[in-house]
Image (cartoon, rainbow, N blue to C red):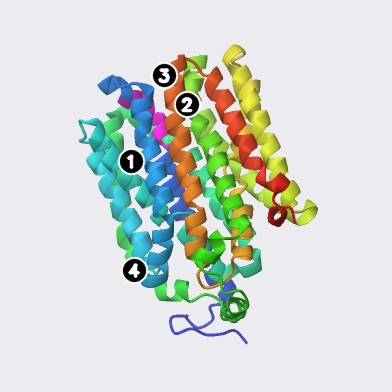
């Protein structure tokens, strides 16, 4: 017999509610990640408007990543105490206000406050931490598959918003584009407030009973988790992987333009990473059930490393075939490890405090994204090119892979 909750309409089945929740999380992630990654298209126009160097302009992107990462455990706690409506609504409010403020910004600190701090917090509020907690209440053992779908929203957001950003910049300028983005986010806030959040937050009754049993068996706290080697192994994996990937991703469109590709073609090509990312996410998750988690994760790292090599070749051989190969290998693996690492963390540290624990582990991703993007800009300015940057990214990705080679808890 299907359990009935107070907000459930007659005839609604838990599976239908679960799919609605999944669709909502996906849509919010498309918006959040797409708006965040659109900065790669705005990088050159903003820097040219103010004659700022690469390190200065990328500090905005780095601050957004840092704010998102450091806020993760607090957002997890806010979710536990106030529920999804408050967290997601706060995210859209921050994003809308931030982009409208950025449209009128004149100083670097104003961009850092709006596009950096506020956008980073806004993306985190509608991002992976609240999504993983909410989806965990509905999908249970199938959480890796559900999170793979949501993580692929990064690709969908890139696919939609990067070319759109370039078109808007060409037609109304970068300030006009930010006005449109900010206004859209605030308009979407209205229907978000009226969704059946009590129903969405209730979760599956069967999974709730199962989770309750797990809590009694495990009883993890943040302090006890931090004393376990798996906590720091996952933290380091998040950190070093983010360093390597974001050192490059923040500058890929600019890199392709410098290599000789027209701006719209460069933005569109990188935007198409959204298509391959969807297949990469689902493919790596499927491999998890076929060859095991460790081998699946290592396979994804191997493709990322190949992608970095292809990007290096593009500088000397700028052609569509190498560009396509780079997008397929590197683009398909951005975040592909996220669902598996999330599921690993939630399996090892399962219990009523898993949201806070996972949010704290996610700080590694935020710190890595911030440091990687900032260091990438600094390396570019110091060397005047991209060779040292590519080597830096390669070493970082390899370091991110090492925990899955040597840490016992991650080798199972």
Mark 4: secondary structure: loop
Q: State the residue in front, 112 or 367.
A: 367
| Disc 2 to disc 1, C-alpha distance | 19 Å
| Disc 1 to disc 4, C-alpha distance | 29 Å
Badge nearest the viewer, 2 or 4: 2
| Disc 2 to disc 3, C-alpha distance | 16 Å
Q: State the residue in front, 387 or 171.
A: 387
Q: Is residue 56 left or right of residue 400?
A: left
Work out whether mark 1 precedes mark 3 in sequence or the reverse, and give the earlier one: 1
Q: Is residue 2 left or right of residue 167?
A: right
> What segment carries the magenta color?
38-46
Badge nearest the viewer, 2 or 1: 1
Mark 3: secondary structure: helix
Q: Residue furthest front?
A: 227
Q: Position of residue 58 (x, y in %)?
A: 38, 30
Work out whether mark 1 precedes mark 4 in sequence or the reverse, and give the earlier one: 1
Task: Check if mark 2's residue and mark 4's residue have beta carbons within 8 Å.
Answer: no
When the figure is inspected, residue 333 is found, relative to residue 326, above or below; the finding is below
Residue 253 - label:
2
Work out whether mark 2 precedes mark 1 in sequence or the reverse, and give the earlier one: 1
Q: Position of residue 306 (x, y in %)?
A: 68, 29
What residue is disc 4 on?
Answer: 194
When the figure is inspected, residue 228 is found, relative to residue 180, above or below; the finding is below
Badge nearest the viewer, 1 or 4: 1
């Amino acid at each position: 017999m299907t359990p009935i909750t107070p907000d459930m309409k007659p005839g609604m089945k838990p599976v239908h509610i679960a799919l609605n929740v999944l669709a909502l999380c996906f849509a919010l992630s498309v918006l959040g990640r797409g708006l965040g990654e659109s900065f790669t298209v705005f990088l050159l126009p903003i820097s040219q408007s103010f004659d700022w160097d690469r390190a200065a302009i990328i500090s905005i992107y780095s601050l957004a990543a840092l704010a998102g990462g450091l806020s993760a455990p607090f957002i997890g706690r806010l979710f536990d105490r106030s529920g999804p409506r408050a967290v997601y609504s706060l995210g859209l409010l921050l994003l809308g206000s931030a982009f409208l403020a950025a449209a009128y910004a004149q100083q670097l600190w104003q961009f850092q406050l709006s596009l950096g701090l506020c956008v980073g917090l806004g993306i985190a509020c509608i991002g992976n931490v609240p999504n993983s907690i909410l989806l965990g209440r509905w999908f249970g053992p199938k959480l890796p598959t559900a999170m793979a779908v949501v993580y692929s929203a990064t690709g969908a957001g890139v696919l939609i918003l990067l070319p759109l950003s370039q078109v808007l910049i060409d037609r109304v300028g970068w300030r006009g584009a930010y006005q449109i983005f900010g206004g859209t986010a605030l308009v979407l806030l209205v229907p978000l407030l009226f969704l059946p959040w009590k129903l969405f937050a209730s979760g599956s009754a069967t999974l709730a009973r199962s989770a309750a049993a797990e809590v009694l068996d495990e009883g993890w706290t943040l302090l006890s988790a931090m004393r376990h080697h798996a906590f720091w192994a996952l933290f380091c994996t998040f950190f070093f992987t983010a360093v390597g990937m974001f050192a490059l991703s923040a500058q890929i469109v600019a890199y392709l333009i410098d290599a000789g590709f027209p701006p719209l073609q460069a933005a569109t090509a990188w935007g198409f990473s959204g298509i391959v990312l969807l297949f990469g996410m689902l493919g790596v998750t499927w491999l998890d059930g076929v060859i095991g988690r460790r081998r699946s994760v290592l396979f994804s790292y191997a493709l990322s490393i190949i992608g970095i090599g292809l990007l290096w070749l593009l500088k000397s051989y700028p052609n569509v075939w190498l560009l396509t190969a780079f997008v397929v290998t590197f683009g398909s693996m951005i975040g592909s490890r996220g669902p598996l690492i999330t599921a690993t963390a939630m399996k090892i540290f399962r219990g009523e405090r898993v949201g806070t624990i996972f949010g704290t582990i996610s700080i590694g991703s935020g710190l890595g994204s911030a440091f990687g993007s900032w260091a990438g800009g600094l390396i570019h300015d110091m060397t005047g090119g991209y060779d040292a940057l590519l080597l830096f990214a390669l070493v970082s990705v390899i370091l991110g892979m090492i925990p899955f080679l040597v840490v016992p808890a991650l080798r199972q």
